[in-house]
Image: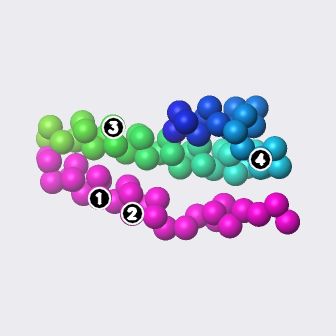
Amino acid sequence: YLHWRYATHKFRLVNKDLSNEIVNRVNNKLLGANIFYIAAVLISFITPTLSLIIYVLVPLYHIRPAKFDNYSNN
């Protein structure tokens, strides 16, 4: 998340044509994953099985294509 924020801040390391909507969607997706991982760590003290399930589901969520994955400059 922090790498993405650095790269997209004032379009430092990304194409200047990249829309703010895509930048914000990726921000939200990455931030959401971090929130779920933090929750999984906290849940692990109560129920480790649920924590492991979260750790498996978050990457699966990121593997599936999102609407903004087909972005092109055309």
Q: Which mark is residue 60?
A: 2
Labels 1 & 4 near each other (Cβ < 8 A): no
Instruction: Answer with the quarter of the image where residue 34 lies.
Output: top left
- What residue is shown at x 73% (from left), y 49% (from top)? 21
Neighbor class of circle 2 (other Cα within 10 Å; few <14, some 14-19, many 20+) is few
Give whichever of discs 1 and 4 has the lower sequence position. Answer: 4
Looking at the rendered structure, the secondary structure element under dot 3 is helix
Q: Is residue 55 magenta?
A: yes
- What residue is shown at x 29% (from left), y 52% (from top)? 55
Taken as a whole, is the magenta stretch helix, strand or loop?
helix
The amino acid type, in three-letter code, at marker 4 is: Asn
- What residue is shown at x 14% (from left), y 48% (from top)? 48
Looking at the rendered structure, the secondary structure element under dot 4 is loop
The amino acid type, in three-letter code, at marker 2 is: Leu
The amino acid type, in three-letter code, at marker 1 is: Val
Mark 3 to mark 2: distance in Å?
17 Å
Give whichever of discs 3 and 2 has the lower sequence position. Answer: 3
Q: Which mark is residue 15?
A: 4
Neighbor class of circle 4 (other Cα within 10 Å; few <14, some 14-19, many 20+) is few
Above-or-below relation of 47 to 6 = below
User: Which portion, as a residue range, is magenta?
Assistant: 47-74
Above-or-below relation of 1 to 64 = above
Mark 3 to mark 1: distance in Å?
14 Å
In the rendered image, which residue does mark 3 sit on? 38
- What residue is shown at x 31% (from left), y 40% (from top)? 39
In the rendered image, which residue does mark 1 sit on? 56
Labels 3 & 1 near each other (Cβ < 8 A): no
Labels 2 & 1 near each other (Cβ < 8 A): yes
Q: Is residue 31 left or right of residue 41?
A: right
